[in-house]
């Protein structure tokens, strides 16, 4: 029609999928229509926008439930980014007269983190240009988790009050605040109102941070830090939705189909399976679950994969962190208890006990298992 009318035709059309509920399209007759205004009132405009962009990829349908939205809010925003911002500001205020501390000697940990963020900013830019905002937000969440891991490893609270460690304490807190500043800039297009509040809490004023300023080391030492307030207060899943989560977990994790006799696997079918060596960079427990762990796994793809495994009864997150493992890398992503799982970490079943199958330390992540 455009061509017939003598008008220029578009060269590329970006089409998003549908939000579905329980695998079905929303319908008044089914009574499964979600009120976006009610969700906006519950989560806030910015957090709702974050969830919609984070959990849907262009061209594919995505499932919507209230508990998934709240779980994503708690996981990415309250426990991860919000926690990083609040504790780094609070510790800086308490130990450096309410200001951004001075940056001392930059060690290997700081250099590694800075390098990850320099590459991460460009990675996010590439994802946005490729119309993959969900991948960009996934990477931002991973970057935030790396700063939290850096803080946990450095334990700045143990250095407070010790004059001989004051320079090191300042370096740790400056680094955490500076990385938080970059995260604020990356999240600004998705959550402009909340990131305006975050900039104020970092003493940066209300103006957006230019993209070219999203580089490490730009934060000015001595900047006054206002007293922080929780940017993303944690939410509780309602009793109704909690039962839905438990039902989903029972259906997905605990149900075992009756065996009807073993069948031989054709070699062609086996070849479809893509096995790779992965490196677990971090691991945490899945909220509302006593069985599930969520690992960030490096497969040398330029990003971390989130993989959920039912191993919490046999391993702590600390015991799985930094292990080299075997991963089924071409499984279709699924959601378990609100967490996206993009593969499967292989364990052996030794009389009901899960035992991790490990790869040798000298094998690089991403190597194909043949």
Image (cartoon, helix red, strand yellow):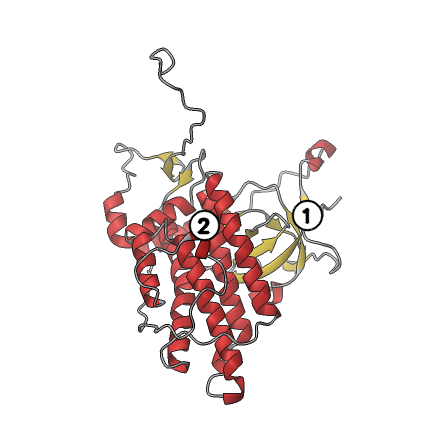
The residue where tag 1 is placed is 276
Is residue 233 visible in this depiction of the protein?
no
Pointer 1 local density, CA inside 10 Å: few below 14, some 14–19, many at least 20: many
- Looking at marks 2 and 1 on the same chain, the residue that comes earlier in the sequence is marked by 2
Q: Going 32% across and 35% down the picture, which residue do you hit?
A: 26
User: Quick check: 22 left or right of 271?
Assistant: left
Q: In terms of image quadrants, where is residue 4?
A: top left
Q: In terms of image quadrants, where is residue 351?
A: bottom right
Q: Give x and y (percent) for residue 200.
A: 31, 65
Q: Give x and y (percent) for residue 274.
A: 67, 41
- Image quarter where the C terminus lies is top right
Residue 24 drawn above or below residue 309: above
The residue where tag 2 is placed is 137
Q: Give x and y (percent) for residue 191.
A: 34, 52
Tell me the SS state at disc 2: helix
Q: Nearer the viewer, residue 157 or 283?
A: 157
Q: Are marks 2 and 1 in contact (CB under 8 Å)?
A: no
Q: Nearer the viewer, residue 363 or 218?
A: 218
Q: Going 61% across and 54% down the picture, which residue do you hit?
A: 298
């Amino acid at each position: 029609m455009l061509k017939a009318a003598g008008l220029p035709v578009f060269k590329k059309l970006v089409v998003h999928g549908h939000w579905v509920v329980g695998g079905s399209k929303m319908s008044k007759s089914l009574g499964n229509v979600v009120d976006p205004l009610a969700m906006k009132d519950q989560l806030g405009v910015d957090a709702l926008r974050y969830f919609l962009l984070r959990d849907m990829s262009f061209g594919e349908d995505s499932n919507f439930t209230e508990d998934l939205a709240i779980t994503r809010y708690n996981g990415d925003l309250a426990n991860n980014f919000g926690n990083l911002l609040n504790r780094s500001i609070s510790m800086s205020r308490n130990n450096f007269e309410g200001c951004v501390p001075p940056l001392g000697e930059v060690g290997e940990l700081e250099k590694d983190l800075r390098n990850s963020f320099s590459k991460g900013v460009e990675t996010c830019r590439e994802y946005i240009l490729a119309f993959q905002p969900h991948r960009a937000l996934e990477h931002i969440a991973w970057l935030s988790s790396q700063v939290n891991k850096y803080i946990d490893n450095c334990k700045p609270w143990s250095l407070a009050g010790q004059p001989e460690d004051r320079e090191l304490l300042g370096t740790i807190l400056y680094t955490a605040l500076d990385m938080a500043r970059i995260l604020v800039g990356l999240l600004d297009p998705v959550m402009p109102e909340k990131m305006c509040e975050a900039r104020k809490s970092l003493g940066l004023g209300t103006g957006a941070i230019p993209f070219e300023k999203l580089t490490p080391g730009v934060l000015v030492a001595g900047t006054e830090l206002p007293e922080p307030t929780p940017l993303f207060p944690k939410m509780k899943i309602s009793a109704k939705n909690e039962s839905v989560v438990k039902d989903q977990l029972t259906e997905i994790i605990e149900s075992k189909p009756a065996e009807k006799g073993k069948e031989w696997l054709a070699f062609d079918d086996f070849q479809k399976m893509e096995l790779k060596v992965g490196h677990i960079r971090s691991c945490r427990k899945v909220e509302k679950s006593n069985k599930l762990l969520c690992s960030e796994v490096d497969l040398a793809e330029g990003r971390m994969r989130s993989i959920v495994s039912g191993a919490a009864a046999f391993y702590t997150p600390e015991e799985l962190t930094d292990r080299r493992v075997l991963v089924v890398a071409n499984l279709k992503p699924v959601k378990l208890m609100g967490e996206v799982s993009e593969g499967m970490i292989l364990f052996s079943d030794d009389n009901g006990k899960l035992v991790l199958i490990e790869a040798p330390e000298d094998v690089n992540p991403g190597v194909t298992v043949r």
